[in-house]
Amino acid sequence: MSKSVMSPRVASAFALFETMRLDQRGQVLLLAYHLQRLACSARQLGFKFDQDTILHSLRPYLHQSYTQPQRLRLSLNKTGHITVTCSALATTPNPYVLP
């Protein structure tokens, strides 16, 4: 089985992202799992990953009080640059459960 090789110019435009639910107490359920999954993807794709730097970037959002759950989105580019955005999580009026 052969591996595909991506052009460096194209690869530099990509970023990994992880979207997490931040509850009203400012806690992310399964944060360690989210970070582990991001680390695995970063390793596989040759992205720079520094967990301490990522946790430092998340710190302003964690353990704050929110009036409603938030969507916390972390993006990581190949060089290790991190972008974090936080926005209100839209509520679903009637969740649908698959049979």
Image: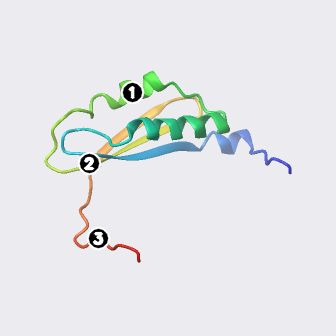
Q: Of the residues shown, which amino acid type is indicated by label 3?
A: Pro
Q: Which mark is residue 55?
A: 1
Which mark is nearer the camera, 3 or 1?
3
- The CA distance from mark 3 to mark 1 is 32 Å
Provide residue 50's location: percent of width, then percent of height: 51, 24
Q: Is residue 1 left or right of residue 7?
A: right
Nearer to the camera, 54 or 25: 25
Q: Is residue 81 left or right of residue 97?
A: right
Q: Residue at x 50, y 30 (%)?
A: 81
Q: Which tag, 1 or 2, sits closer to the chain's start?
A: 1
Provide residue 43's location: percent of width, then percent of height: 63, 33
Nearer to the camera, 51 or 82: 51
Farthest-out residue, front = 99
Q: Of the residues shown, which amino acid type is indicated by label 1?
A: Leu
The colour scheme used to paint the residues is: rainbow
Q: Which tag, 2 or 3, sits closer to the chain's start?
A: 2
Disc 3 is placed on an element classified as loop
- The CA distance from mark 2 to mark 3 is 17 Å
Q: Residue at x 41, y 77 (%)?
A: 99
Query: Crowding at label 2, few (<14), some or many (≥20) Cα neighbours within 10 Å?
Result: many
The answer to the question of whether label 3 and label 1 lie on touching residues, with beta carbons closer than 8 A, is no
Nearer to the camera, 70 or 29: 29
Provide residue 68's location: percent of width, then percent of height: 17, 51
Q: Residue at x 85, y 49 (%)?
A: 2
Q: Which mark is residue 95?
A: 3
The residue at which mark 2 appears reads as 70
Q: Residue at x 26, y 60 (%)?
A: 90
Query: Crowding at label 3, few (<14), some or many (≥20) Cα neighbours within 10 Å?
Result: few
Q: Which mark is residue 5?
A: none
Query: Crowding at label 1, few (<14), some or many (≥20) Cα neighbours within 10 Å?
Result: few
2 w.r.t. 78: above or below? below
